[in-house]
Image: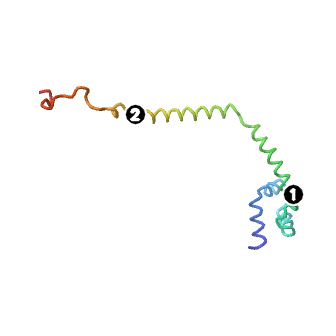
Amino acid sequence: MSKKEEFKAFAKNHPELVSKVHQKDASWQELYEIYDIYGEDTRAWDKYLKESSTSNLSNLSDIVKKIDMDSVQKHISTAQKALDLVQELTNKTPTNASFKGPANPRPINHFFED
């Protein structure tokens, strides 16, 4: 496997690097040069990987703050109603499924109200 292919695999395993490039904090050329010199040594990547993990947590907290809890509750309630309906439909047995025959069987010699 070439060094370039190894770097691509390394970048796929660390999506924080992609966000650094998108945020213009680093270029792919810079990152490749670091990889070429140091390889996957974590000390060389601390600047890029550890800062990203804290920014990911702040991004996550921003996302959580934007969630409309009333909307979430409404969707949960709708889903619960649907589940209750399915459960009600599956628990009911048709009335003819419990048919055991007439309560008073007719005599054998009387077929059609003879």
Mark toward the start of the polypeptide (1 vs 2): 1
What element does badge 1 sit on? helix
Report the residue marked by disc 2.
93
Q: Is residue 58 above or below residue 2?
A: above
Would residue 107 be found to the left or right of residue 41 on screen?
Answer: left
Front label number (1 vs 2): 2
Q: Quadrant of the N terminus?
A: bottom right
Tell me the distance, in whole angstroms, between the alpha carbons under discs 1 and 2: 64 Å
Quarter holding residue 16 = bottom right
Q: Which mark is residue 88?
A: none
Q: Quadrant of the C terminus?
A: top left
Question: Local crowd at mark 2 within 10 Å, few (<14), some, or many (≥20)?
Answer: few
Would residue 70 be found to the left or right of residue 11 on screen?
Answer: left
Percent of width and height locating residue 25: 86, 55
Report the amino acid beneath label 1.
Asp
Report the residue marked by disc 1.
46
Percent of width and height locating residue 55: 83, 48
What element does badge 2 sit on? loop
